[in-house]
Image (cartoon, rainbow, N blue to C red):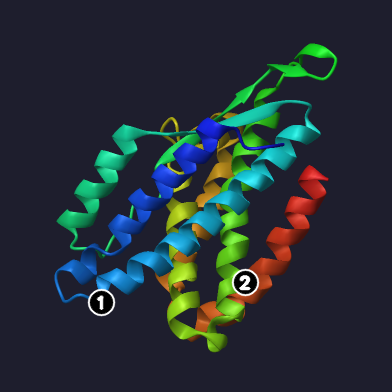
Amino acid sequence: MEFTRQEINDIILSTLSIACTLIVSNLFLNLAWIGKFFMAAIIVSASLIIKLFIQKRVAEKYDCEIKYAFDYSLFIVGILIAFASQGSIIFAVMGGITASSAFVSRLGHKYVNITQRERGLINLSGPMANIVLALISLLLYPLSNDFFQLMLNVNIYMALFALIPIPPLDGSKVFWWNRLVWLISFIIALFMFFMARTVLFSIIGIILLVIVTFVLWEKMF
């Protein structure tokens, strides 16, 4: 369940790319973008690593491994969207994972058959991890408004855009496995996107945190 050197390089590339898109709105205002960039880099890297760790953990459960790779086409899309919206929309997904059914283990090459359901669950666990992180940041919001507000936004954007059913995004594998599961997951992420700044979200968010945690536990462990 280790990260390869290439994965670490791609995580760094993704972190810097997403952090750049997050500060676009500040570029039109003042030099406050410098401080926001470092805070965004910390939040993005932590959120991405946790997401990938969960996906690797689920993949391990099915005796396979995943690799994360930076995607330059997603980077271009993210930059264009950020500048077109002047930073109001953040395409916070700069890469995707691939599940391998053949890899080297301590006993030599190992081969496993990954079903469509297993691929779907592996990919779904990533956006669900982001949703849980978003809800946790909501609960911790009173401790540091700026930090946890940004953490909330980053993870909502990560979950929402990752669930778009287009390769190499997570949503593509979930969609082809089970369209109902994909639809429910996407609606939850979309709901959070629109309700993130309301009092109603605070109440429903805590309920969703319990539900999502329970469902993940039942499905994957």
- On the image, the x and y values in percent for residue 190 come to 45, 59
C-alpha span from label 1 to label 2? 26 Å
Res 32 label: 1
Q: Residue at x 49, y 68 (%)?
A: 151
User: Picture quarter containing residue 56?
Assistant: top right
**Badge 1 local density, few (<14 within 10 Å), some, or many (20+)?**
few
Note whether 136 is above or below 7 in the view shown.
below
Q: Amino acid at mark 2?
A: Ile
The C terminus sits in image quarter: top right
Q: Residue at x 60, y 75 (%)?
A: 204
Q: Amino acid at mark 1?
A: Ala
- According to the image, label 2 marks what residue? 136
Q: Residue at x 74, y 54 (%)?
A: 215
Q: Earlier in the sequence, mark 1 or mark 2?
A: 1
Note whether 96 is above or below 135 in the view shown.
above
Residue farthest bottom in this picture:
142
